[in-house]
Amino acid sequence: MGINLVIAVTDGDWFEILRRQRELDEVNFWAPSAASFRALQPGELLLFKLHAPRNAIVGGGIFAYANVLPCSLAWEAFREANGARSALEMRTRIARYRKTGPNDRSDFDIGCRILTQPFFLEERDWIPVPSSWSPNIVSFKIYRANEAEGLALWEAVNDRLNRSQIPGMAEDQARFGEPHLIRPRLGQGAFRVLVTDIYQRRCAVTRERTLPALEAAHIRPYGEGGHHEARNGLLLRRDIHSLFDAGYVTVTHDLRFEVSRRIKEEFDNGKHYYALHGQLITTPNETGQRPDAAALSWHNEHCFRG
């Protein structure tokens, strides 16, 4: 199967805010509607085009994941990498595009298209849109790298990255070479969104499904050598996440929830948590996304208070 590229129309404010940030490892290219996005597979390129009359490609990134989230949770996951200075600014922009009334306080569901290794081109390096691009396009258009226009796009992007110093782009990342899938390197925001989805938006321990009360936990913390990847994640209710990070609870190698005796000893409390002790956690359907045994062993040996 050939490699696709997408040229997507972007909000000028989104672009201007993000290109001033340095060393971004991910961005949320959001859409104001909750429409699903299936135009790309992970590892393909999404390129940004400004609104007319600036008919040029001004940057892009490696597509990692897409889903739908309430705008408040998208802000929590990506913050300024949403291309806004605050949650209020982001929400106001969404409301403007959705043409809602000033008193609408809905937590809008938005389409999130998560990109890693984003790059933003200097104006001298902007790429003209292909001749087939229509001014009537308001969202995006797919190009195929095994066809002339798509290959020309790939080569133009490769050329810009090879000759320009792109903030956040290491030398080995810039040289894409022949069209191929590029492995996305997930950041913190993408990790949170991915883990939320693979656990079907339910706490792995309690099955709680109130989305604002759930958090993606690293089994082995990033600062301790863990990675932003599915197998190093658990979706937990906020209080259980806090206890997990502090070592008062853990998950054993056989995927059972274990509660430390020290909750009772130190706080003379914890009845609710002890009621969950020993039960099997719920894990993702795909074997390759289930908790990593080595990460669980690390948490049991180096974090759990026993």
Image: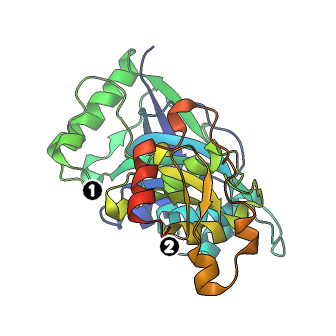
Which quadrant of the figure has residue 130? top left
Going 76% across and 65% down the picture, which residue do you hit? 107
SS for dot 1: loop
Count how many numbered circles sit on residues in the image: 2
Name the residue furthest bottom.
Answer: 267
Q: Amino acid at mark 1?
A: Gly
Going 35% across and 67% down the picture, which residue do you hit? 20
- Residue 134 visible in the current orientation: no
Q: Which mark is residue 279?
A: none
Between residue 98 and residue 292, name the one nearer to us.
Answer: 292
Q: Position of residue 292 (x, y in %)?
A: 46, 43
Between residue 95 and residue 306, name the one nearer to us.
Answer: 306
Q: Position of residue 273 (x, y in %)?
A: 70, 68
Distance from Cα at disc 1 to Cα at disc 2: 32 Å
* Labels 1, 2: front one: 2
Residue 76 lies, with reference to residue 269, above or below; the image says: above
Compared across the picture, whether 208 is left or right of 176 comes to right
Q: Quadrant of the N terminus?
A: top left
Q: Position of residue 12 (x, y in %)?
A: 50, 59
* Residue beneath disc 1: 168
Crowding around mark 1 (Cα neighbors within 10 Å: few <14, some 14 to 19, many 20+) is some
Residue 40 lies, with reference to residue 115, above or below; the image says: above
Between residue 11 and residue 276, name the one nearer to us.
Answer: 276
* Residue beneath disc 2: 246
Q: Earlier in the sequence, mark 1 or mark 2?
A: 1
Q: Amino acid at mark 2?
A: Ala
Crowding around mark 2 (Cα neighbors within 10 Å: few <14, some 14 to 19, many 20+) is few
Q: Position of residue 303 (x, y in %)?
A: 43, 66
SS for dot 2: helix
Which quadrant of the figure has residue 138? top right
